[in-house]
Amino acid sequence: MHCLKSILAATMLLAPAMAFAEPAQNDANDAGAPQPAAPSSESVADATTVTQTGADQRTLVFAQRPMSAASSFAVQDREFSLRPIGSVQDILRVTPGLVTVQHSGGGKANQYFLRGFDADHGTDVAISVDGVPINMVDHAHGQGYADTNFIIPEAVQRVEITKGPYFANQGDFATAGAVNLVTRDDFDASSIGFGVSGSPGYGKLGYRGLLIASPKWDVATATFAAEIGRQNGPFENPDKFNKYKLFNKITFKVSPTSSVSIGEMSYGGNWHGSGQIPARAVEQGLITRFGSMDPNEGGDTMRHQVYALYKLRPASNSEVRALAYVGTYTFNLFSNFTLYLHDPDNGDEINQQDRRTFYGGKVSYRVAHKVGGIRFDTTIGSDVRADDIHEMLWHTANRMQLDAIRDNNVRQTMMGAYVSEEVAPTSWARIVLGVRADSLAFSVDNNLPNSTDPQNPHSGVDGAQQISPKASAILSPLRSRDALLDFYINWGNGFHTNDVRGVFTTPSVTPITRAVGEEVGARTRLFEKLDFATALWMLDLDNETTWNGDDGTTNVSPATHRYGVEFEGRYEFTPWLAVDGALTFTHSQFSTDNENGGGLALAPKQTWSGGLSARHELGPGVARAGLRFYGIGNRPASDDGVIVAPGFTQFDLHLGYRMQRWDLALDIENLFNGNFRSAQFDTVSRLRTDPPVGTPLSRLPSSLCGSNGRVAMDPATGGFGGCEGVSFTPAYPFTARLMATLYID
């Protein structure tokens, strides 16, 4: 699942003080002093050694700080290379407790579940690539929308994972957790790859082509990659998901102590979707589980971004990092959640449009020093992000626009500054104190001023601010070859922003939601074979953005309270065979109402994941295999718990064989062909065959809304107002992907 062995090795090397090794002077008085061990590139991410000249030479290793929370770590690519990887969402599953599920059509962002959150498309999970944020503020489809489809999976070298609001360098959306995908500077070899995929007995075959060029230069490292593909899925209305991606990155060594990386990513995708179909329509035999109620659902999207990262070592004990980025984004989505509830003639299809330019930057300065035997590691930094957005919502039929529902221009700027101080008074204890300040400024222009809808935002200008203190303590009582043990205590404030258009509606919402989190946990490694970690956590939100299935939008709920416990472990049978697993239990509720059905709508109560991983020499090459599983338990689909979203467990298989010149990989998704639902929502809808809205309830058949549904009341007439029940996207059946790669240098 992830490489705890490497993680704990890094902690053992670095935890006694900070990520700077003690200077080793070339002086006779220091000849007998013990020399610090340098962490390997495998165990410590981004480690760099400074080459120095002169009489006073030092050996200095600079790397990321050791972990400061039991639930934070980094995962190298050699771990997720043993998994079935069809897209970046499969890489994200290396995060214990993070469940990602397929949404309708494949081209939309995934649905994320973490720490008791149905984070929808990313509201409470901050996702970035090389530090560039992926989440979209004030998105036409939902706040925090994080679509990772633009990333080529093979380009990801490392995944950096944190959970909770305990880290001063993290801002918007980093409440339940944050994931940063770090891309490669280069590949071992250039290559050409081609693959096919499909579900036997369902749909048409898809394909994928991948080109990678990784030239070797003296002055720079570079990677150029291009992907093209088509995915049809098992649906009767094929996805026809066409994907085009580019990834280009070049890193120059400006001097012995500085470098600059320039990266570019481009993506275009278009697809059809079978939507979220009502479970009762499948029960009644109106459609199959791979059928569609509105074949016109789907859309298209594009994202282009460029960034530059500058790293400088001004002195042997300090580092400066500066990141700047700019990007453009378009999004065009057709959906139909309520079917024929509001417009029985044309249907309730909607078109969501988002056009934006986003740009920003981050800068940080880190310095380490020692005063009277006490070590200090100080970081100060700031970041800024601005979005210029035009978004519209249309009522459509057969992808033809009928009337505009919303038309807004939104401008938003978020600025943040932070300071973090790590103090190590002894070799077995560290304290981390930090504070972050954020300021949000925004304006909204309503281009439909004659609308009488109170939810249609009026024009306005406003702002908000928040101060977020943080604190952590780390104790390391055991530090030997056969036993490593670390204890962690964390507390911190964080936030997610809400869609600022809601500030100018009736009722209005707060632009920033405060989160307060606490966590205690431990990590251990025993006898160089068994790794284990556990964390007990709580998280309170002043309010949160939740899914409103009635109209396919989001709204803000009252304050919430969550707590849970996480377990993760790994056992290495042999150097080439290991087993791992993760298990989480969570309770979620509204803070003002403890009797809300035992949990918030769609909030996960249990998640699990794990599997076997193997890599071994076989003949002239190396064979690899991974048998994986992940799942989520039954959870309430409605806040009162009456409507239930059934859980599932999915098993996947990866087999691969690598020789010097070629690689062959077979991935199987849903190995045992389980019949279960992927994305699920509680939705009020009306089928064409349902009675008209307003029909007296006494005239309705008892089985109208299915086995896990109920009649919704029309507030205007007191009669039939549609059926409330689960609408879902089915999981793919048994699906195979075969990929062959030829290495050309």
Image (tube, grey):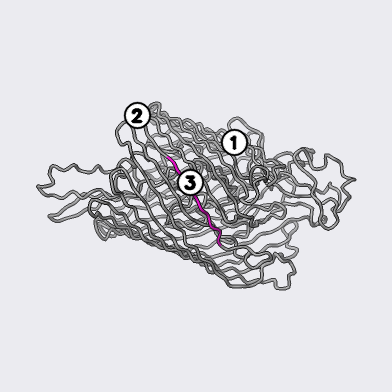
Mark 2 highlights which residue? 527
Say which residue label 3 marks.
153
Structural distance between the alpha carbons of marks 2 and 3:
34 Å
**Residue in the image at 51% along x and 67% along y:** 413
Q: Are marks 1 and 3 in contact (CB under 8 Å)?
A: no
Q: Is residue 518 magenta?
A: yes
Q: Is residue 239 visible?
A: no
Q: 245 or 343: nearer the eye? A: 343
Q: Is residue 279 left or right of residue 12?
A: right
Q: Residue shown at 67%/56% (left/top)?
A: 553
To which quarter of the image does residue 199 belong? top right
Give amino acid for label 2. Answer: Phe
How far apart marks 1 and 3 lie (CA) works out to 19 Å
Query: In the rendered structure, does residue 455 fall within the stretch colored magenta?
Result: no
Q: Residue 580 location, x and y as percent?
A: 46, 32
Residue 589, image x, y percentages: 62, 47
Residue that numbered label 1 is attached to? 735
| Residues rendered magenta in the picture | 512-521
Callout in the foreground (2, 3): 2
Find the distance from the CA under tag 2 to the CA under tag 1.
39 Å
Crowdedness near tag 3: few (<14), some (14–19) or many (≥20) residues, C-alpha within 10 Å:
some
- Tag 3: amino acid: Pro
Point out residue 411 in the picture as x, y percentages from the top left corner. Answer: 56, 69
In front: mark 2 or mark 1?
2
